[in-house]
Image (cartoon, rainbow, N blue to C red):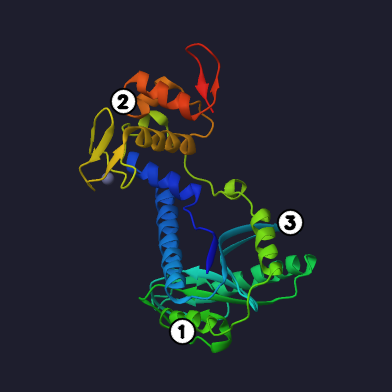
């Protein structure tokens, strides 16, 4: 199995993760953040299952964002085998739900849209692309519920649903369908990766946070903690005990600033302040100069 596109946290998730450390998130952002985190955890759990149970020479593309005939679709996981394409929508819901055509219902009466409908729409649009590209492969799809604490009542076998307990068997079953990958399969994967869209135009809105109100200071690359011992070379984290090079830590914090404030200029002074004055002005200047392109010559210069 070859993973052609690894799963990564979305920019939105990274921004909210960082803001959550440095300030108090608004209620709606906190909700978005929690959903993104749960979703990502679920996807990672699925990825672990794939690594554990799929041993054949299949191609895996995660988190594919495509615009097809003006419609945007997002595919959590796509598996290309010698015989078929499998499209998976991954859900990390927890608890007991009742299945119905349009909604999943909890016993307390809460309703959420049935993900199968969303998946079916994605399938229709993706088929248009396959047709345009003259790919004549069978397309299978399923909503995968990965959380072991999830139960769905009244689910039919025809519903394109894979429940947590059935997931290993489903994946093991794929290994029995042996037909080798050909050049065509690789070409299809390459074309899909090329068509993949960057997520920026697709971002949800979030609250605006004032720079001044955010907590300043270096955070640990590994766990995000502010409890660091900073010396000339390294940064030692009191929370997770990781020891990371100072330069790497500063750069990660600069990147954090850039994704939160994409329109603000990165200057030496600003980054010195952002890092809580834990690193000297000269050192920051050197780090920025080595990594980024400098714009302007004098004190007002900034980095791209
Ligand atoms: Zn740490």
Does the rendering let one see residue 294?
yes
Q: Which residue in the structure is indicated by mark 2? A: 279
Q: CA distance from mark 3 to mark 1?
A: 37 Å
Question: Residue 143: x and y, percent?
Answer: 53, 74
Say few, some or many: other residues with alpha carbon within 10 Å of mark 3 (under 14 / 14 to 19 / 20 or more): few
Comparing 204 with 227, the one in front is: 227
x, y (%) of residue 281? 35, 19
Residue furthest left as drawn: 238
Q: Tell me the CA gap for discs 1 and 2.
A: 53 Å
Q: Evaluate whether residue 23 shows in this view.
A: no
Picture quadrant where residue 78 is located: bottom right
Mark 2–mark 3 Cα distance, whole angstroms, equals: 48 Å
Judge from the rendering whether residue 102 lies leftward or rightward of residue 239; answer left or right. right
Residue labelled with disc 1: 169
Find numbered disc 3 in the image and state the secondary structure of the residue it sits on: loop
Residue with the mark numbered 3? 70
The mark total stands at: 3
Quadrant of the snapshot with the C terminus = top right
Label 1 CA crowd tier, 10 Å (few <14, some 14–19, many 20+): few
Q: Report whether 82 appears left or right of 302.
A: right
In the displayed structure image, the side of residue 131 where residue 34 appears, left or right: left
The front one of 180 and 33 is 180
Kindly check if marks 2 and 3 are in contact, taking CB atoms under 8 A apart as contact. Answer: no
Nearest to the observer: residue 174 or residue 257: 174
């Amino acid at each position: 199995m070859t993973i052609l596109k690894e799963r990564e946290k979305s920019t939105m998730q990274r921004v909210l993760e960082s803001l959550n450390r440095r300030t108090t998130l608004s209620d709606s952002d906190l909700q978005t953040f929690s959903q993104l985190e749960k979703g990502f955890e679920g996807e990672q759990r699925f990825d672990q299952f794939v690594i554990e149970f799929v041993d054949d020479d299949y191609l895996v593309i995660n988190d594919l964002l495509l615009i097809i005939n003006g419609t945007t679709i997002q595919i959590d996981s796509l598996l290309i085998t010698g015989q078929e394409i499998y499209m998976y929508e991954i859900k990390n819901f927890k608890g007991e739900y009742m299945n119905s055509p349009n909604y999943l219902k909890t016993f307390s009466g809460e309703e959420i849209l049935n993900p199968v409908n969303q998946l079916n729409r994605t399938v229709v649009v993706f088929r248009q692309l396959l047709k345009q590209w003259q790919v004549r492969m069978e397309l299978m799809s399923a909503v995968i519920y990965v959380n072991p604490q999830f139960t769905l009542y009244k689910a039919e076998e025809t519903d394109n649903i894979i429940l947590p307990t059935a997931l290993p068997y489903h994946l093991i079953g794929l290994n029995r369908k042996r037909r080798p990958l050909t050049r065509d399969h690789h070409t299809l994967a390459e074309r899909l990766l090329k068509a993949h869209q960057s997520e920026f135009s697709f971002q949800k809105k979030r609250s605006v946070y004032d720079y001044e109100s955010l907590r300043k200071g270096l955070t640990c690359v590994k766990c995000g903690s502010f409890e660091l011992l900073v010396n000339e070379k390294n940064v030692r984290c009191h929370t997770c005990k990781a020891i990371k090079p100072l330069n790497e830590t500063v750069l990660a914090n600069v990147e954090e600033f850039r994704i939160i404030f994409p329109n603000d200029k990165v200057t030496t002074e600003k980054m010195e302040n952002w890092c809580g004055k834990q690193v000297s002005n000269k050192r920051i200047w050197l780090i920025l100069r080595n990594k980024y392109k400098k714009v302007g010559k004098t004190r007002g210069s900034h980095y791209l």
